[in-house]
Amino acid sequence: LAPITSASKGTTLGLGTFDNLDGELVMVGGTMYRISTDGTPVVIDGSQSTPWSESVKFTPTASGPVPPGTTCANLLAGVNALAKSDEGMVAVRVRGTFSDLTFRSVPAQTVPYPPLAQVVAKQTLFPLSQKRAVLVGFRTGADLAGTGAPGLHLHGLTADRKAGGHVVSCVAGNDVHLSVQRTAGVQVQGAAH
C-alpha cells in the first residue's frame, strides 16, 4: 500500500480505491474525492493509502460529441475511434447531461478478503436521472491485460459534486462530449503480491 499522493503527483485525472476497498476514488481536475457507500463525494488530501489507482496529467488529444441515447456500454467504440486504436492505454473524460446514470460504491472489506465478485454483490447503487456529470477513467487495450481489466473503466461525479462513484451504467443526453488522450504515461499504483 502507498499514499495516494505518491502515485498521483502532478496528475489531474484518475480513479482507484482505498485500503480495504473502502470506497471509490475519483480525481477530476487534480482534486481527489472519496465516495463511500452513502454516495457522497468528499474531498481528500491524498494521505490515505491505496492498493490500486491509475492517474494521468490529462491533456486531451481528440474529442467529439456522443450521440444522444448512447449507453456507457457503447462508449468503447467512440473511445477507440477517437484514439484511432483499440490498443494501449487511453485516458477518457465524458461530460454532459445523462438521462440515466448509475454509480456504485462498496463497503470496506476485512481479512480474509473475499473475491471481488462477492464484494460487488454487496455494492450500494446510486441511480440518478437527468444529471450533469463528469466521468473519468481509462480504456485498457487487450495488449495491456494485467495492468487493468481490458475495456473501459469509469468513475464519476455529478457536476454539483453531490453524488458519484464507480460508473455502473449511463445513457447520454443531448450535450455529452467525449475527450481522450492516448498515453504512455499513466501512473498505476498497485499492491505488491
Image (cartoon, rainbow, N blue to C red):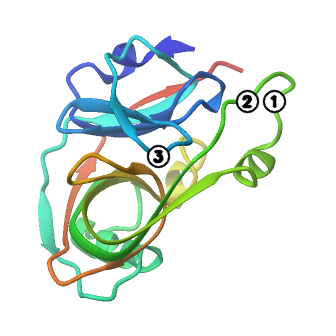
Q: Considering only order in the chain, which callout, 3 or 1, is on the residue closer to the N terminus?
A: 3
Q: Amino acid at mark 3?
A: Gly
Q: From the top left corner, tell me how far across and down residue 44 is, in percent.
A: 34, 22
Q: From the top left corner, tell me how far across and down residue 133 is, in percent.
A: 25, 60
Confirm whether residue 52 shows in the render. yes
Whole-angstrom CA distance, mark 1 to mark 3, is: 23 Å
Q: From the top left corner, tell me how far across and down residue 34 is, in percent.
A: 42, 32
Looking at the image, do the residues carrying marks 3 and 2 touch, with CB atoms under 8 Å apart? no
Looking at the image, do the residues carrying marks 1 and 3 touch, with CB atoms under 8 Å apart? no
For the residue carrying disc 3, how many other residues have a C-alpha within 10 Å: few (<14), some (14-19), or many (20+)? many
Q: Which mark is residue 39?
A: 3
The residue indicated by pointer 1 is 113
Q: Residue furthest right?
A: 112
Q: Residue at x 29, y 74 (%)?
A: 98
Tell me the quadrant of the picture where the N terminus can be found: top right
Whole-angstrom CA distance, mark 1 to mark 2, is: 6 Å
Nearest to the eye among marks 3 and 2: give it: 3
Q: Residue at x 59, y 22 (%)?
A: 19
Nearest to the eye among marks 1 and 2: give it: 2
Q: Amino acid at mark 2?
A: Gln
Whole-angstrom CA distance, mark 3 to mark 2, is: 17 Å
Confirm whether residue 186 shows in the render. no
Looking at the image, do the residues carrying marks 1 and 2 touch, with CB atoms under 8 Å apart? yes
Q: Amino acid at mark 1?
A: Tyr
Judging from the image, what secondary structure is the residue with disc 3 in? loop
The residue indicated by pointer 2 is 109
Q: Quadrant of residue 93?
A: bottom left
Q: Is residue 83 above or below residue 164?
A: below
Question: Is 109 placed left or right of 153 in the picture?
Answer: right
Question: Is 152 placed left or right of 180 in the picture?
Answer: right
Judging from the image, what secondary structure is the residue with disc 2 in? loop
